[in-house]
């Protein structure tokens, strides 16, 4: 419903080329269900329905969030750069809260934890393109941009996981000092894996942004990316 409202309610989206966003959304879903199928073959009856529900919540929220960011881009690009980034992050956090409420969870603690996870990973998806563009010198260089995007997504997710672990340990207590290095290492590995997964989720959307002039204009406007030739001409 949110995607339909954004597609119809924003004037710039009333264009048949907006339907191209269905391609990366379909590819992301196909990849996700393929992975779940392979996991189910390996785990057999040990697969947990509650675990799959949690993964569904994470995947669908972030996939819808990515699609929504591209739909909302015409509104964001009118804002100052800092406000634009904050608005994108706020949108992803709000969507995370709405998703958790919509799915329903077993307890307030679980709701808060999932909202924190979804909000932080959604914020990473919203923030890292701006960081990657900055390190590209605000120039439109797709290869360099995607490399920096991968690095920043991994760093962002590692910090997010370690931050949540630190909060959980401080609130609930945790292992002794001797166990902290192992816990930090496990959190860093988990964050890196999640960062790579988010990169794979982000990839088809970015490829659409590079390939389609319609969405390339949104990408360049939101990230203030200039063509290298134009930059040299200045």
Image (tube, helix red, strand yellow):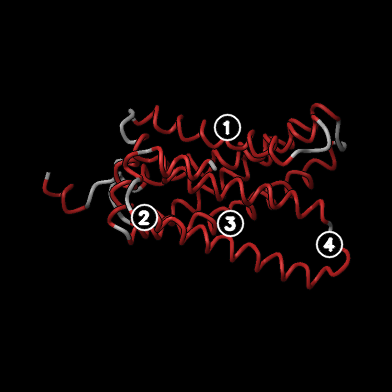
**Residue in the image at 35% along x and 31% along y:** 81
Helix, strand or loop at disc 4?
loop
User: Within 10 Å of the Cα at label 2, are there few (<14), some (14-19), or many (20+) other Cα atoms?
Assistant: many
Q: Nearer the viewer, mark 2 or mark 1?
A: 1
Quarter of the figure with the N terminus: top right
Residue behind mark 2: 209
Q: Is residue 165 left or right of residue 25?
A: right
> Is 191 in front, or is 105?
105
Q: Earlier in the sequence, mark 2 or mark 1?
A: 1
**Residue in the image at 21% along x and 52% along y:** 228
145 versus 134 height, above or below: below
State the separation of the CA atoms marked 2 and 4: 36 Å
- Indicate the position of residue 157 as horizontal and vertical percent values: 60, 45
**Residue in the image at 29% along x and 42% along y:** 221
State the separation of the CA atoms marked 3 and 2: 19 Å
Residue behind mark 3: 196
Q: Earlier in the sequence, mark 2 or mark 4?
A: 4
- Indicate the position of residue 135 as horizontal and vertical percent values: 37, 45
Q: Nearer the viewer, mark 3 or mark 2?
A: 2
Residue behind mark 4: 47
Q: Quadrant of residue 131?
A: top left
Q: Earlier in the sequence, mark 3 or mark 4?
A: 4
């Amino acid at each position: 419903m949110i995607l339909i409202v954004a597609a119809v309610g924003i004037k710039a989206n009333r264009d048949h080329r907006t339907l191209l966003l269905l391609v990366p959304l379909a590819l992301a879903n196909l990849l996700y269900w393929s992975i779940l199928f392979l996991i189910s073959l390996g785990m057999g009856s040990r697969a947990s329905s509650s675990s799959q529900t949690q993964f569904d919540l994470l995947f669908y929220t972030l996939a819808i969030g990515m699609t929504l960011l591209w739909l909302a881009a015409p509104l964001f690009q009118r804002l100052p750069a800092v406000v634009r980034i904050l608005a994108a992050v706020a949108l992803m956090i709000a969507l995370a809260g709405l998703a958790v409420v919509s799915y329903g969870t077993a307890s307030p603690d679980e709701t808060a934890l999932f909202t924190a996870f979804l909000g932080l990973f959604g914020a990473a998806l919203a923030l890292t393109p701006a960081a990657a563009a900055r390190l590209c010198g605000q120039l439109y260089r797709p290869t360099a941009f995607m490399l920096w995007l991968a690095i920043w997504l991994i760093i962002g997710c590692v910090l997010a996981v370690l931050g949540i672990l630190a909060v959980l340990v401080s609130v609930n207590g945790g292992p002794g000092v001797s166990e902290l290095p192992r816990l930090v290492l496990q959190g860093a590995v988990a964050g890196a894996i999640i960062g790579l997964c988010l990169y794979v989720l982000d990839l088809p959307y970015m490829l659409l942004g590079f390939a389609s002039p319609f969405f390339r204009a949104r990408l360049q406007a939101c990230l203030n990316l200039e063509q290298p030739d134009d930059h040299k001409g200045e």
